[in-house]
Amino acid sequence: MTPPPGIEQRRILKTAIPGPRSAELHARKNTAVSAGVSTGLPVYVERAGGGILVDIDGNQLIDFGSGIAVTTVGNSAPRVVERVQAQVADFTHTCFMITPYAEYVEVAEALNELTPGEHEKRSALFNSGAEAVENAVKIARSYTGRSAIVAFDHAYHGRTNLTMALTAKNMPYKHRFGPFANEIYRVPMAYPYRWPTGPENCADEAFEAFVSQLHAQVGEENTAAVIIEPIQGEGGFIVPPAGYLARVAEWCHDNGVLLIADEIQTGFCRTGDWFACDHEGVVPDLITTAKGIAGGLPLAAVTGRAQVMDAVHGGGLGGTYGGNPVACAGALGAIETMKAEDLPARARAIEALFVPRLREMAAKYPQIGDLRGRGAMLAIELVSDPEAKTPDAGLTAAVNRACHAAGLVTLTAGTYGNVLRFLPPLSITDELLVEGLDILEQAFAASV
């Protein structure tokens, strides 16, 4: 991709990270914003584009986070900017449920075309990933007349009450926020690195556990839907073994259970396909999307089989801001960019550059217990004892801090807090990727 004009695509450190102006603004944040809203790197950004974030002290940081997989097309992507500016000048809101507008319909049409499967589809637009997941559950229950929803270990589906129930990790997402929504059940995730009998047995044994536990604890006839991230996000970028997702999908089809694919983090070219389900030809009944959908504007969606989506009574889906026209304009610009720039191919190219370097690091540092992911959604899991696979959250935090201090924005993840995840914008240059990997290796050398 061609980086946007006006921001030189190189790292510049004018001050320590964070700089004095960021520190001053962060002090104001602490007196104005709830302490429950934390920041991983208190560097205050004033401009961004390509693979660079420019802070208020004039530092230019390399971005390996994309605002948690949101700015997939890059910040200030020209097609997004152009469409959003035009839409703001026309009107900012009417509420689609009152007086509708074409932009919502156009986004729905694009989603119906792009998401997996050739069947007739419908879409509904919302504000956030959690809201999309909640509505997918509503739709599944309405269509099937059943109530039980099955989720997986290590899952992350959001921070609202229902989605906290679906989310597996307690701290910081669920701690002291209960009680949670009921009729939510959990089964083991096919996690090759940590499967007790080894990765070679993971696919078969995880699927057997899924079937047997669901049958015994829930009952197929009571199950409305199984919800799964094709590659788990916050849980640590866990990639299930080849064929596992297809087996779950087949079981759902055979038992009249809907399969909900949560592609909020994996969708829109991030994993080297338009959607992660495409990698194995899996066609979900419902798919939830958000994050990369709109170039940084708040938008989410549920897309699914027409007969499923249309089973909900009129007025049963919606919301004041859902499918806001400005956010829809951003989505149309982002999707146009993804097509014009062939961003699935760009994600695969990033993987081809990234993975050999990470493998070299893993050979040098035994603390890197596992390397996994796909496309521009990659991660390394850090352990203190490679044999016991003991999670090392302390080392993970130390490497993360060292990257930040050197001007590289990295993120952590994982149920045990011991995963470094990499989500660069697909607009980043190869030169910045290489420099970022150099910084990462230096951070390891300084931390182990």
Image (cartoon, rainbow, N blue to C red):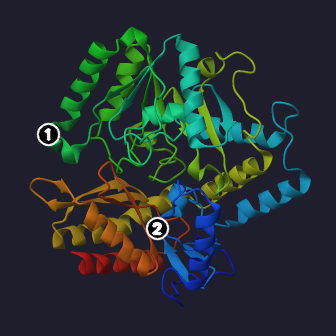
Q: What is the number of the mark on residue 30?
A: none
Is residue 76 among what the camera can see? yes
Q: Residue drawn 24% across and 67% down? A: 359
Q: Which numbered disc, 1 or 2, marks the residue that appears first in the sequence?
A: 2
| Foreground of the two, 185 or 225 | 185
Q: Residue drawn 53% across and 71% down? A: 42
In the image, taking residue 32 as reference, residue 215 lies left or right, namely: left
In the image, taking residue 201 as reference, residue 136 lies left or right, namely: right
Q: Residue drawn 52% across and 12% down? A: 144
Q: Residue 422: percent from the left, percent from the top?
A: 41, 62
Q: Residue 369: percent from the left, percent from the top?
A: 20, 59
User: Badge 2: few (under 14), some or many (20 or more) residues near its Cα, within 10 Å?
Assistant: many
For the view shown, which residue lies furthest in the left direction? 387
| Foreground of the two, 317 or 159 | 159
Q: Which image quarter holds the N terminus?
A: bottom right
Q: CA distance from mark 1 to mark 2?
A: 32 Å
Q: Residue 127: percent from the left, percent from the top?
A: 66, 42
Residue type indicated by callout 2: Phe
What SS does tag 2 mark?
loop
Q: Quadrant of residue 378?
A: bottom left
Q: Is residue 201 above or below residue 396?
A: above
Q: Quadrant of residue 183?
A: top left
Q: Residue 338: percent from the left, percent from the top?
A: 60, 56
Residue type indicated by callout 1: Pro
Q: Which residue is mark 2?
A: 64
For the view shown, which residue lies furthest in the right direction? 90
User: Badge 1: few (under 14), some or many (20 or more) residues near its Cα, within 10 Å?
Assistant: few
In the image, taking residue 276 as reference, residue 56 lies left or right, namely: right
Q: Residue drawn 32% across and 55% down? A: 417
What SS does tag 1 mark?
loop
Q: Which residue is mark 1?
A: 196
Q: Which image quarter holds the C terminus?
A: bottom left
